[in-house]
Structures are given as structure tokens and as C-alpha cells.
Amino acid sequence: MRLFWSILSQISYLTSQISNTMSGNMNLTLKVWRQKDAQSSGKMVTYKAENISPDMSFLEMLDVVNESLTHKGEEPIHFDHDCREGICGMCSLYINGRPHGPKRAITTCQLHMRSFQDGETITIEPWRAAAFPVIKDLAVDRSAFDRIQQAGGYVSVNTGGVPDANVIPIPKVIADEAFNSATCIGCGACVAACKNASAMLFVSAKVSQLGMLPQGQPERYSRVQAMVAQMDEEGFGNCTNTGACEAECPKEITLTNISRMNNDYLSAKLFREQAVEHDGGGA
Ligand code: SF4
Ligand code: FES
């Protein structure tokens, strides 16, 4: 009888392999970080992801795995996501040792399973940084970024409606550069990629997008000091100058932003600190 079941199971496995080959679908092994909560220690747990379409997104593949875990009465894998189109910055997964996986300039939700090979083993971990504590499994707390934004990522002037914005002429090259900085989605991949868990790329993008425009001038120097101070308070490390952040950023935010921020910060410290203390800013 045992022999019968063994043969049956081998036939079933072979049938599924043949069916996968014909459909182009993949069978994968996942090694996933599971952690009950911030206080518990975590560990890697192995799962099978079977009959996965190459056209699925990485998050859809995880949905399939979670569905099968739920059917078996097991706890699904917790991971963050929202827009699933590269806008919100929520899908923070460290895949095969790289933030957002093997492709350049895309987020995890834009990564497709055709980027992997049938039979491959994929490791999936959360962002690793003291300032991003794990909430559960692959979900981390990135509220440190919110607090940095709250420290200075705003303008006090009334910018009016849309027609008013066009009344202030801004050279195209400046407008384009400010827009590039503004494309940062706050995902935190730059922190995860940095061996010092530095947040310089994120903070510099947020400082730059306002500091380059006329509307951002009143708080330009107080802003950079306040946001850098908050960044340090949150426990992010110093810049390593290796450029890992730029290489892994899904929005291709450049290191030029960090140079620009350092320039403003130095200028604020050397020449404008008095003005900042007295009136909260000064262009
Ligand atoms: S700079 Fe890039 S990697 Fe860092 S938070 Fe912004 S979009 Fe994400
Ligand atoms: S889920 Fe919004 S950027 Fe990936």
C-alpha cells in the first residue's frame, strides 16, 4: 500500500512538473524571515511557491503563498504594500540580498517573477536598520521618516492655486531637478542598502525638492538643520560615500542631492545659525 501511495505521489509530482513546463510556470523555494513581533527573535523559514506564473508580480506571488498558508491554517507572511504601482514606497522587501530585488530602478511591486529562474531559491528579508524596527515578519516601522519630514519638510508661504504657481518663473533646468528630487517615495531602500544604515539620500532629496524652488527659500537653512538633527536623533548612521544608496534607489535619486544638502548645511552652520535661532529661517 505504501508503495502505491509513493508511486501515486511521484506521478502527481511529474504531472505537475510537465504541466508547469508546458504552461511556463515556475516552482520556487522561498526562505522568508518570520518574526512574531519587535520583541521576539526571528528566523528564516522555508516555503514552496508552486505553479507561479512568470507574469505575476513579486507581491502577487507572495499572495499565492499566503493563500495556501491560510488554507493550511498557518499564519500568513506579513509584508507591507499599498499602491502596487511604484508610488507609495510601502513594499520594502530585501530580496536575494538587495533592496527591491535584482532589477534596477523598480520597486518590489513592479518586480515580476520572470526575473527569476524555475527552481530558484529566493531569500526574502525585511529592511535591516536600527531606525526601522521590525513590526512583524517583513513589515518594518518607517515612522522615523515621517518624523524627519515633520521636522522641516514643508513650506510656510501660501503658494496659492495652480495658476498662481505659474506666475513665478522658474528656469526649466531647476524645475526639472527639483522634480527629480521630489520623486523620492520614502521607501527606505537607501537606508537598507547602506552598511551604516544612513538616511542621507532620503533626507537630501526632501531638502532639495524644496530648497531649489523660490517657495522653499524662507525656511531653506532652518529646514536643513532641523531635518539633519532629526535624522541623527532617529539613529541613522553616517554616509559611507560608497554610493550603495544611489545604486539601489528605485527612483534613481542621485548623490548630487547629498552634496547639495551638505552645502546648505555647512552654509547654515557657518553663516546663518544666528538667523535661524532668531527668526526661524532666512534665505
Ligand atoms: S531616496 Fe530612493 S531609496 Fe531612498 S527613500 Fe527615496 S526613493 Fe527610496
Ligand atoms: S506597493 Fe506602493 S510602491 Fe510598491
Image: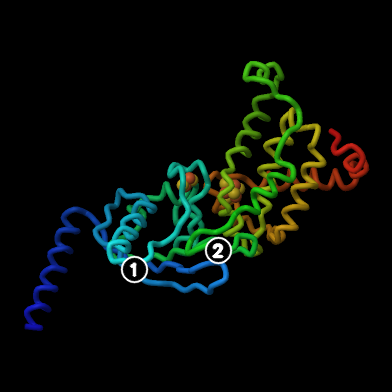
Left or right of 262? Residue 184 is left
Q: Indicate the quadrant where residue 120 lies.
A: bottom left
- Type of amino acid at the residue the image marks with label 1: Tyr
Q: Nearer the viewer, mark 1 or mark 2?
A: 2
Colouring scheme, one of rainbow, by chain, secondary structure, one colour:
rainbow
- According to the picture, the residue beneath numbered tag 1 turns out to be 47
Q: Residue at x 40, y 72 (%)?
A: 45
Sort mark 2 into few (<14), some (14-19) or many (20+) by Cα contacts within 10 Å: many
Query: Residue 56's x, y, as percent?
Result: 32, 50
Query: Residue 203's x, y, as percent?
Result: 68, 48
Q: Residue at x 55, y 63 (%)?
A: 134
Query: What whole-number distance in Å separates the C-alpha atoms at marks 1 and 2?
Result: 21 Å
- Type of amino acid at the residue the image marks with label 2: Val
The N terminus is located in which quarter?
Answer: bottom left
Residue 3 vs 162, above or below: the answer is below
Q: Which residue is drawn at 64% across and 59% down?
A: 242
The C terminus is located in which quarter?
Answer: top right
Residue 207 vs 232, above or below: the answer is above
Lower sequence index among marks 1 and 2: 1
Residue 20: mark: none
Sort mark 1 into few (<14), some (14-19) or many (20+) by Cα contacts within 10 Å: some
Work out whether residue 86 or residue 251 is closer to the camera in this orientation and state it. 86
Q: Residue at x 73, y 25 (%)?
A: 158
Number of labels in the image equals 2
- According to the picture, the residue beneath numbered tag 2 turns out to be 134
Left or right of 60? Residue 245 is right
- For the residues bearing labels 1 and 2, Cβ distance under 8 angstroms: no
